[in-house]
Image (spheres, helix red, strand yellow):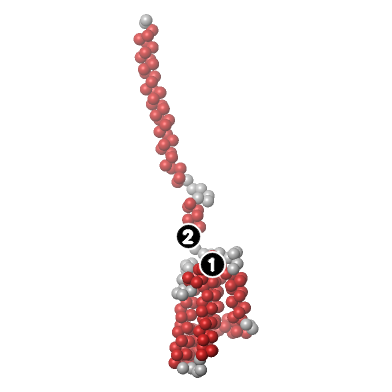
Amino acid sequence: MATLPLLRPYSFLRTPTLTLTLTLTLKTPTTKIPFLPLKPQNGGVGARMSNSSSSPAATERLISVAAYGLPLLNSVQHGRYLMAQFPKLGVLLEPILPFLAFYRSIPYSSFVAFFALYLGVVRNPSFPRYVRFNAMQAVTLDVLLVIPLLFHRIFSTGTGPIMVFSSNAIFVFSVFCFLYAVVSCVLGRTPYLPFVADAASRQI
């Protein structure tokens, strides 16, 4: 009978100690769980976001700029009336005169450059989409510039005011598209040409 009062207080003193240790053990992992998603992992969401937001490489920009040279070289002939009226504008085209002379020295150069750009770049999956889209825009713009040229050759009978105005408008539009596309590609941005971007995006 003397041992019962001594065992009961001892057992009651051990119970809070067990409860306290269990509470600390259960709370420890809950404090670490919120920090698990912050650990960087390869191939995670952060890596995909950094790859998608990265700017194009220098070679991709250079190829894109060179692609827009095709419609510019084919549209120089439309500016003959404008440069005859303002001779100082011809000075702006002097940097591309060597390329223009070499381009025109090749037989069927427009067809060769067109199919080389379309089949070699646009339809080549080894190039990134940035380069293919810009090449397709240049090809589409070049095709659009051929339409008024054919119209002039079929229905034109001389150098009337309509002929001069349409040629000047085509030349100014092509130069504007070239400058806009070159500046955008140099800055690593994607140029969206009017009347051209939608048609080009459907082909990519």
**Mark 2 or mark 1: which comes first in sequence?**
2
Tell me the residue at 49%/59% (across/down).
52
Depth check, front residue: 125 or 184? 125
Residue named by callout 2 = 53
Residue 42 location (% of width, % of height) = 53, 50
Residue named by callout 1 = 204
Q: In the drawing, what numbered circle is on residue 159?
A: none
Q: Amino acid at mark 2?
A: Ser
Q: Amino acid at mark 1?
A: Ile
In this view, the residue farthest toward the top is: 1
Image position of 168 with respect to 40: above or below: below
Tell me the residue at 62%/82% (across/down).
108
Say which quadrant the N terminus sits in: top left
Tell me the residue at 50%/68% (across/down).
201
Q: How many C-alpha atoms fall within 10 Å of the one at disc 1: few (<14), some, or many (≥20)?
A: few
Residue 124 location (% of width, % of height) = 60, 67
Judged by depth in the image, the label closer to the viewer, 2 or 1, is 1
